[in-house]
Amino acid sequence: MLRNYSVRTDLALEEKERFESDNVEISGVVLEEHYDEENEIRVTRVRIETENGAKAMGKPVGTYLTLEAPGLAMPDEESQMTVAGELCRYIRELVEQNVPERKEEISVLVVGLGNREVTPDALGPYVADHLHVTRHIVKEYGKYAMGMDHANLVSAVVPGVTGQTGMESAEIVRGIVNETHPDIVIAVDALAARNSRRLNRTVQIADTGIHPGSGVGNHRCGMTRESLGVPVIGIGVPTVVDAATIVNDTMENFIRALEGSQSLKGVGETLRSYSPGEKLEFIKELIAPHLNGMFVTPKDVDEMIHHISHTISEAVNMLFTKRE
């Protein structure tokens, strides 16, 4: 039944979990976990250290930080500030690792990727809306106009999507980078997840850039250090999940129910013997072609995107424009 199955996900953590569920060790890939019990925040660090590891994972060599927090999309301001503080700390870590010179003041370009007219894909534009952009003020009046001894130059752009502009987002951003010469680019985008429990409660931060649309099979030109000429930090939140994943999760519950039945226990055990990949491939064959290309998002995604965008923008503002 199983040929070469692929899990539609943008999260490096879920790629690593796929191999672990099949009892496969990946050489050159290191996973570390930290759990903050008080704030219910779990941080997982996946480091892809070798080209062999990168080939197995299907992702470039680099560091992928995944922060899972139930409070990410909550309307509670205290929870949002706690998550924003953690995000700020990990974004700072990757920025300091990737900016070649330790500068007191750096120039950063924040790119809000996605389509503002489609709510699950509007995260990037919404984050850009809430940023404290400072480049124009510092350029015009100097850093002391910001009331700071050290003022970073923060600029932001929302390049839209190819269907709106006729241009790849990477082409637009490359032109801006060549003109404004930022030290680093931070690209924010909506992602796709394999696990429905991670929707709108997980943030991935990676120093390998970002590839818009890859999780939903809409591959566009990537924004990476190689394509833009400067380091690129990718920040993404999974807002959609493949329909096959929903059915697969339902099947897991169904198998547990069968195993609890005396008369149907054997059927449940037979289904349980399939690997996760085999079950997913089987489900895709059953639901094709009508549901195979469908992606699902929570019904309250409007409110969630609103809260998440505020949390991420606050983390970026804390890092680059906080008064000393």
Image (tube, rainbow, N blue to C red):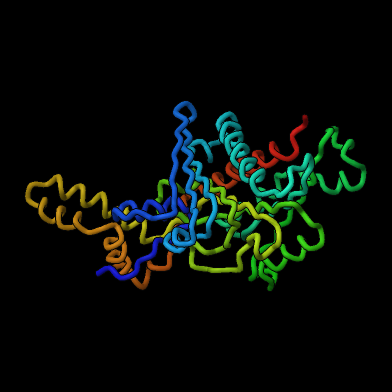
Which of the image's four quarters has the C terminus? top right
Q: Measuring from the top left, give residue 70's x and y in whole percent.
A: 47, 37
Compared to 50, does 313 lie above or below? above
Instruction: State left or right for residue 26 relative to residue 60.
Output: left
Q: Measuring from the top left, give residue 209's x and y in whole percent.
A: 60, 57
Where on the picture, by quarter, is residue 52?
A: bottom left
Q: Nearer the viewer, residue 313 or 23?
A: 23
Q: Residue at x 52, y 55 (%)?
A: 191
Q: Is residue 124 visible?
A: no
Q: Nearer the viewer, residue 23 or 9?
A: 23
Q: Measuring from the top left, give residue 128's x and y in whole percent.
A: 69, 50
Q: Residue at x 69, y 38 (%)?
A: 319
Q: Residue at x 38, y 68 (%)?
A: 292
Q: Measuring from the top left, give residue 150's x and y in whole percent.
A: 82, 36
Instruction: State left or right for residue 84 relative to residue 56.
Output: right
Where on the picture, by quarter, is residue 165?
A: bottom right
Q: Is residue 113 visible?
A: yes
Instruction: Point out the residue furthest to the left here.
Output: 263
Q: Nearer the viewer, residue 276 or 73?
A: 276
Which of the image's four quarters has the N terminus? bottom left
Instruction: State left or right for residue 228 relative to residue 10.
Output: right
How many numbered discs sit on the rendered protein? Answer: 0
Instruction: State left or right for residue 320 relative to residue 64.
Output: right
Instruction: Point out the residue furthest to the right here.
Output: 141
Where on the picture, by quarter, is residue 272?
A: bottom left
Compared to 161, does 42 lie above or below? above
